[in-house]
Image (cartoon, grey):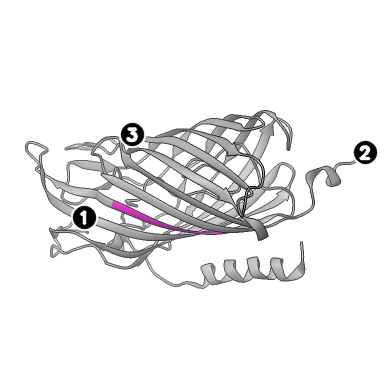
Amino acid sequence: MRRREVTAAVAAFSVVLGVRNAAHGQGFDLDSFKPVAPTTGYLCEESTRLMPVGTLDLSLTFGYAYRPLVVRDQLNGGVAGDIVTYRSTVYLTAAYGLHERVDAGYRLPVVLAQAGTVTVDLTGNGGVPRHPAAHALGDLDLLARVRLLGPPDGHGFRLTLTVPLGLPLGNTDGLVGTGSVSVRPRVIAGWEGARLSTALSAGYELRQKTVVPGSTFVVGQAIGAGVGAAYVVLAHKVAFLDTLTVLAEASLAIGLAHPETGSAATPAQALLGLRTRLPWGLVVQVAGGTGLNRSVGSPRMRALITVARTWDGVPASRNRKP
């Protein structure tokens, strides 16, 4: 990789680490499913692919969620209003191929705007009811993936371990910071073909137990699962398009918290999208979908737009010993 590309990656990471935004007490992250690097993943679900050695992927995703958190009546569970009617978020994501079997990166969400129709006690300790912060920095995710089985490239079955580590940089008043470290290990099994890619994943989410303000839900430790698929409908260059891929996925987080009242949050969503590769290493991706239930973090509508730039490194085959 050229020196200026490495310098850009280090500089971007330094900016992330240099951001100061203290979390205030415990909280929870309303965004249950976050975008992944388009070079290797689907939409919010990871595939078994790793970044090629020396390859850098920088991406920016704009996300919009409609009614991701509503107020529910404590007696009958009916909807009484919106804590968050809409939320607009930008995600900064980076991924880098360290080895044939290992890659690493980070993801940082920033809430640009959010608003609701009702106020709630965000602290849960009898504080003054208010709206969540309209603008907020989210927790920083450090991402590491390890290929356990399968070839580094080409077609075939692969088994990959991913271990996102969440650092509590986010603002809990904006419902985008947890206030504590979280770990979400997951095993991904998948098949890579000439045009079709599929993957199934399952894992455990270790995070603190938090009562969701104004609702009958509790967020805590959970079992995460997901399935994703991608099909290349255009595999050769046509006009300005290098490739065109259709993507589909479904995600689920089964809450394991044991609330004294109410129930554990169990968000689920489904997304469909299109991805195109353009010249100069550019990738553009659009997706839309909906929550599959009415739990915390399952919006009525979800939309994602991603723009990414990839700098190719040394092909994996050049790094193998004869």
Residue of label 1: 85
Give the Cα distance between marks 2 and 1: 58 Å
In this rendered view, identify the residue nearer to me: 77 or 63.
Answer: 63
Disc 2 to disc 1: CB gap under 8 Å: no
Given this view, does label 3 or label 2 mark the residue nearer the observer?
A: 2
Residue of label 2: 322
Q: Quadrant of the N terminus?
A: bottom right
Identify the element where label 2 is drawn: loop
In this rendered view, identify the residue nearer to me: 151 or 229.
Answer: 229
Residue 17 x, y percent position in the rendering? 53, 68
Residue of label 3: 256
Q: Residues within 10 Å of mark 1 (few under 14, many from 20)?
A: some
* In this view, 274 is above or below 310: above
Residue 61 x, y percent position in the rendering? 46, 57
In this rendered view, identify the residue nearer to me: 319 or 207.
Answer: 319
Give the Cα distance between marks 3 and 2: 49 Å
Give the Cα distance between marks 3 and 1: 26 Å
| Amino acid type of the residue tagged 1 in the rendering | Thr
Question: Does label 3 or label 1 sit earlier along the sequence?
Answer: 1
Q: Residues within 10 Å of mark 3 (few under 14, many from 20)?
A: some
* In this view, 200 is above or below 315: above
Q: Residue at x 52, y 67 (%)?
A: 16
Looking at the rendered structure, which numbered label has been put on residue 14?
A: none
Given this view, does label 3 or label 1 mark the residue nearer the observer?
A: 1
Question: Does label 2 or label 1 sit earlier along the sequence?
Answer: 1
In the image, the segment drawn in magenta is: 58-65
Q: Quadrant of the C terminus?
A: top right
* In this view, 133 is above or below 147: below
